[in-house]
Amino acid sequence: LVNLYRNLVEIFNGSKNATLLRNAPEPVKTSLALCHRLLTERGEFSGRFIAAEILRLYRSLDASGRDVFFCGLLNGFAPDPKSILQAGKAYQETSSPENLALLVQAVEAPRRELFQRLNVAANGTRTLVGMRGELLRCLPGHPTLAAVEADLSHLFTSWFNRGFLVLQRIDWRTSASILEKIIQYEAVHQIQSWQDLRRRLEADRRCYAFFHPALPDEPIIFVEAALTRGMSSSVQPLLDPDAPASDPLSADCAMFYSITNCQDGLRGVPFGSFLLKRVVEDLGMDLPRLRRFATLSPIPGFREWLDGPAAEASQIVGHSKLKSLIQTLQQLEWHKDANQCAQVRPLLVSLAAYFLLHVKHGKEPSDPVARFHLGNGARLQRINWLGDTSAAGLQRSAGLMVNYVYRLADLEQNHESYTRYSRIAASRGIQKQAHIALV
Amino acid sequence: LVNLYRNLVEIFNGSKNATLLRNAPEPVKTSLALCHRLLTERGEFSGRFIAAEILRLYRSLDASGRDVFFCGLLNGFAPDPKSILQAGKAYQETSSPENLALLVQAVEAPRRELFQRLNVAANGTRTLVGMRGELLRCLPGHPTLAAVEADLSHLFTSWFNRGFLVLQRIDWRTSASILEKIIQYEAVHQIQSWQDLRRRLEADRRCYAFFHPALPDEPIIFVEAALTRGMSSSVQPLLDPDAPASDPLSADCAMFYSITNCQDGLRGVPFGSFLLKRVVEDLGMDLPRLRRFATLSPIPGFREWLDGPAAEASQIVGHSKLKSLIQTLQQLEWHKDANQCAQVRPLLVSLAAYFLLHVKHGKEPSDPVARFHLGNGARLQRINWLGDTSAAGLQRSAGLMVNYVYRLADLEQNHESYTRYSRIAASRGIQKQAHIALV
Amino acid sequence: LVNLYRNLVEIFNGSKNATLLRNAPEPVKTSLALCHRLLTERGEFSGRFIAAEILRLYRSLDASGRDVFFCGLLNGFAPDPKSILQAGKAYQETSSPENLALLVQAVEAPRRELFQRLNVAANGTRTLVGMRGELLRCLPGHPTLAAVEADLSHLFTSWFNRGFLVLQRIDWRTSASILEKIIQYEAVHQIQSWQDLRRRLEADRRCYAFFHPALPDEPIIFVEAALTRGMSSSVQPLLDPDAPASDPLSADCAMFYSITNCQDGLRGVPFGSFLLKRVVEDLGMDLPRLRRFATLSPIPGFREWLDGPAAEASQIVGHSKLKSLIQTLQQLEWHKDANQCAQVRPLLVSLAAYFLLHVKHGKEPSDPVARFHLGNGARLQRINWLGDTSAAGLQRSAGLMVNYVYRLADLEQNHESYTRYSRIAASRGIQKQAHIALV
Amino acid sequence: LVNLYRNLVEIFNGSKNATLLRNAPEPVKTSLALCHRLLTERGEFSGRFIAAEILRLYRSLDASGRDVFFCGLLNGFAPDPKSILQAGKAYQETSSPENLALLVQAVEAPRRELFQRLNVAANGTRTLVGMRGELLRCLPGHPTLAAVEADLSHLFTSWFNRGFLVLQRIDWRTSASILEKIIQYEAVHQIQSWQDLRRRLEADRRCYAFFHPALPDEPIIFVEAALTRGMSSSVQPLLDPDAPASDPLSADCAMFYSITNCQDGLRGVPFGSFLLKRVVEDLGMDLPRLRRFATLSPIPGFREWLDGPAAEASQIVGHSKLKSLIQTLQQLEWHKDANQCAQVRPLLVSLAAYFLLHVKHGKEPSDPVARFHLGNGARLQRINWLGDTSAAGLQRSAGLMVNYVYRLADLEQNHESYTRYSRIAASRGIQKQAHIALV
């Protein structure tokens, strides 16, 4: 192993991280040397043990140790520039399939094969997903690690192909170890206790998650829905742990009020819209009386826009009503004063409509939640006054919530209009409200 | 769709297959146009339906239609040569990570992403595995399709990573639909009937298979073993459907007498040695009295070598015993004549030992079965006289069979000696026998 | 144990079997002595081992040994007559609940508790069910064993309460060990091979079985159905292993063509009608296009009645047509002669209708199949000419088959009319046919 | 139904409950009438619906309604006294097996068959178990209902035969709905929260439960164990939710610290010792380093005995030390005063030893926990000073806890000595301590 590492060090020599790697702590050195061995090993007998040992060492490293380990992966398992240049030249001379095949081979980092082999260890997939999570956290400080991260990302896109994901209903019969993770991961509307969770899994609620066969205990993404009569306009009643459960058979709406990506290490691998689509289909078959599938969503960037660009504009234009509105929103518990509410409501709702329809980030809405649902082909249906009066709801969305409606028959066309022509499917009501704001 | 296909056709224009594709039958045209659409689709809503439709059309095609379809994949979903050249040039000028990333991207065929998206359809994985099987059959006639095949192969190496495979014991409680496939796939020693299969699954037999979660009804590879007292020297008793089952607890050997790859479409994705290793571990834990794990294997290239190179050499050197041996082997049922057997036995066994140890293909033995087991770290233990007197056994291996022994403690070192220094782990007996042949 | 057996022998002394038991073979003596011990054991620690040993010994006995063992159970584990008389007298004097409770206790044979304790052994339930099967076979020769049999029967009625039975669909994914039993048990239309079975489990066929949790590998009873367009009139097409499978979604009828009780030891514990009812419900939900649920059933006692009572009557009355019909039926392959068929058909069908409607066994039809289905509330719908031309079909049912229709809406009322007033629900067609026969 | 009930009422006429039943609330009348119908129904088609309706009505009744319902079962579904007397007389005249069979039949209450038929409804078993729970609560007030309770008890002894129970490990992967019940049922050492439960299911803890196939979500009985190094002398460390989990492989003892019967309705059906035995076996196989299986048990009747009979005796004999000890124990938090502890410890421990060995209830120890474990064949090993300093522990057991040791090799003999000769297996230490108390 010492020799192996010495060889590695030579590879590192040219690189910026050479010193770092030469002085690496022992477990980093050992694990990198083992990586080399794993890669040169033809037989698969010892492979599993080597892989397991590497992952064990990796898990034992602290943040700075992992940093050095990542640098080792970056410099020691990169493709060989000479081979690339040579294959590139050959292809330039003759663009034959054979030369292309050689070029493809030359540019592929040995890291990819390394990660493939590490996956053979018990809990391999789990550790590798965690590794990418770590890498993504390191990237801002070490942008060069992007190449390592990209290789894992490339692999995960293949491994976590949606064709391999399994949809599972989460309910009170689900294993406690999975439920515990639901509690821990839920980010949109935090779960306060097991009691709170239990309410969210009763007869008039639904929760579905995607799982991958290699991570049977780890939800990848999950969505929570409430079965209601009529489209919900406010999230607090849905979250009330003491609310009595209603009969799911009497419901005509499924309200999606939370969707959560669980694995940092799978960021950027897109599952969300696929999950929603599957759940809409499943619910529609289970409960044929459901006529509407809609979300109850925040407008997370609204307040920031109000306090920033909108406030500035108001100063320039001298829009006094907007100015006072912004001041009102800065008061504590403004929403409990009925008078104030009556005053600000029309303008605030109009501004939200305007924000969603006309404030852009490139060609798409500035609001990420809107981008997600509109991109899925959903329709912007309604803005709900005081739909979320939690601290977070007031601070980010000025207490407003939006219903996006998923109508299976329209999804495709909405999606197409949106992606091709940046057209937003919105109800007439919202269009009007947006119009008023402009006046 | 017509437009889409017209666009595709333009891409094809330069290619050799342009005419072929312009005159493609309707379903081929539709399916290729849909492939294009699937690839440009950002949303995932319609994706599943498009993918399903493409695969349905594909399955409906006859051999010649599939040929055209593959040509479409080859020409219409290849990387863009201009982009490659451009990215190649940029990298030549500055070998930065960014330029490398661009080059990597440029050389990757859009086919890969296409296959990823096709996998989302129901039965996607199964159809894609079948597709590669088909491609491999086409390759001899259409060698240019190798690029398409290579992309599927690349994907399968990732999807069928051994970390995702699940070991399952196959026994009489297994589903009939899986057992039917075992009957159908078993290639080494054909299974004659359900009765025959049943015997192979009794208490003194073991059968293990690897499965992939996306193909729950399809064994990927399986191995059959007999639990015996002493190392078996002959396969016919093991295959006798009327032999009484013995007590597995009294066994001290596990004899692997058959290992079968089930999926043509996964050829070249190596599972075999990994399976054997796992089974040796599992059996060792289940039945701690087992002391020996060995195979009962054919020498499939032996007769061919005897009749070819060895026969030629015998003519040159004038080795009359060898000449008459070769003539004996050409007689029908020579093995039933005890006299003849006595005469040819010493020389034949020596020659087999010589063949296994010294007749090479590169640095490795010419015999593929030997390469497989020696590469795994097994040891060449014994040559068994009339170990397989079936027609196939006589015709290919001159009735001989070999025991390769898997000793966990030695596997690693044997494997290392073999791969590094091409040293073959063999018993002294075999070494002596090989020596005699040389004299 | 010797002492225990000596005590037992004293109990036997009075009995007819005393000599038999005194000279019992050793394993019978041991097992009976252990039965005594098991019953007096308060603790449950050793109970499981004692029970297992008793059952092991029992299984090792040959028929005559089991006979003696049963005699031992009869005499050694009977209620004590003195206690019964005493408790009876007390109850006669004062019919108090307390005295009743004592009498109930006095009359219960200790055998019942013994069987309860034997069930704790591994495979206990299976062995006890087998034991009753054996007892039922012995009963004709040893009618006194009825008391032992009755105790097992009482227990099984409780253990195999229909509330504990689990309905499972049997298809090609079912375990081979269960399918093998289906092949072995099917009595109505024998299954010739795995190929034959496979056809019976294809998309246009259904097979359902009841299982008990303590016998997970043993079907208790199963029914086979074919999904057809129109009500089937002939069983041979349904049994043809080479018939192509039709689309189950296009079917409008479910034809039950076989129902089989699997366990001799559960004879008399009624499951059949419950199974049919459950299957009708399940199929109706799975395939809402099914409009008719009917059987294709034999008339097993018809030929016997024709050759016996009917033939006699024909002699008396001088019914020459009937006489010649009976002679025709005795010819080999009479059904292949179209002329003959045309001649006998009207009378034969009329006689069958008459037989089903008017020939009684007590107040119910003489035909046991008719009793079963009519008792379930089914309706006698149609008699099918040459519905079963197999050897058995010709010999027992004169080649005729009957459709009994299960209409959920009518079952209850039909059942009530049948059980209360012995009224048979029959189509007008059959009623007419029966009428003709009377003329 | 009205008629049916009228008939029933006539049956009731003679009985004490006649008026009660004549004025029964409507749902009671309906349900009792339906019970009659269910019993006279031969077919099984409508049976399931009638049974479901009866159980639905029963569940809707309040306590007084259920009382009347039970009276209806008592009077309306009892065996017929006339038939009993007649059969009794016949048997007195001729004690033939036939006459015995008739008597057996005559004394069996139709209730038993009724309960069998009710079980066919969905959730039948669950409701019937609940019904017996209710009955047991009613018995003190309505002792005549004992006959109804006895019939259910008789049935449950058969249905819940230990041969049908399935042992399942309970851990953090178990369904939340089952874990919730574990929290709710645990009676010995209450579970405070999900956090508390989680600790009890970590690597160094074990929890096993028996389940019945008809009640898959309902544990019948469960036991909790801690894996420790050395035999635990105090329960608080085992219950500490913040204690770090130790390595189960380093443990040499399994300490059973809680065993809980979950179903009131199954009281008297004995499972406990069978569960312990199975768990000892299972643990022994899983963790072969375990050398000792012992309990950490309370002495629930000790303080009561001290304050009652012992205190009285001390007054008579003038045992001043005992008197002051009893006073000490009445002080709050006496156990926190080291001086006081030192003073009372020797006498208190001696008295406990004396209590366990010599204070009897019949021939067995007065302490029910001692009866249970000694009856199982365990050995009284050690008395632990301040083994349980919880309020309940101090109040009932004076803070003491006992280790009973389960040694598989001795269980049978201990059990035999105990049941036959009332000999208690106890360590020499405890025997000595008990001796001191006597002096």
Image (cartoon, coloured by chain):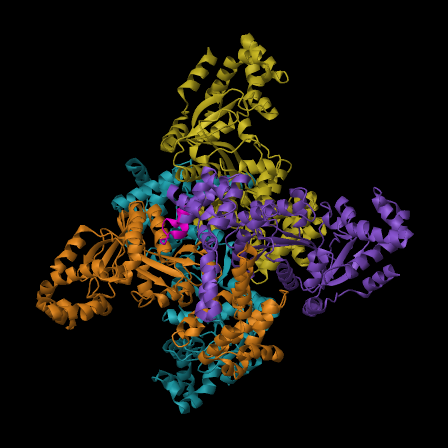
Chain colours: A cyan, B yellow, C purple, D orange
Give the percent coordinates (x, y) of residue C150: 55, 55
Whether residue B357 is situated above or below residue D105 in the rendered picture: above
Q: Residue furthest bottom?
A: A339
Q: Viewer-proximal residue, C55 or A412?
A: C55
Most frequent secondary structure within the magenta stretch: helix
Quadrant of residue D136 within the rendered picture: bottom left
Residue D73 included in the magenta stretch of the image = no
Horizontal and vertical percent position of residue B20: 69, 45
Q: Determine whether A282 is above or below B84 in the image.
A: below
Q: Is residue C190 left or right of residue C345?
A: left
Q: Position of residue A399 (x, y in %)?
A: 42, 80
Image quadrant where one finds the N terminus of chain D: bottom right
Q: Residue at x 66, y 41 (%)?
A: C193
Residues rendered magenta in the picture: C37-51
Q: Is residue B211 above or below residue D100?
A: above
Magenta stretch holds residue C46: yes
Indicate the quadrant where residue D328 lies. Answer: bottom left
Q: Residue at x 54, y 80 (%)?
A: D13
Regarding residue A172, the answer to whether it shows in the image is: no
Q: For this rendering, which residue is in front, D366 or A233?
A: D366
- Residue A439 vs C227, above or below: the answer is below
Residue nearest the observer in this picture, D335 or C354:
C354
Q: Quadrant of the C terminus of chain D?
A: bottom left
User: Could you tell me residue D310's position as x and y percent?
Assistant: 17, 67
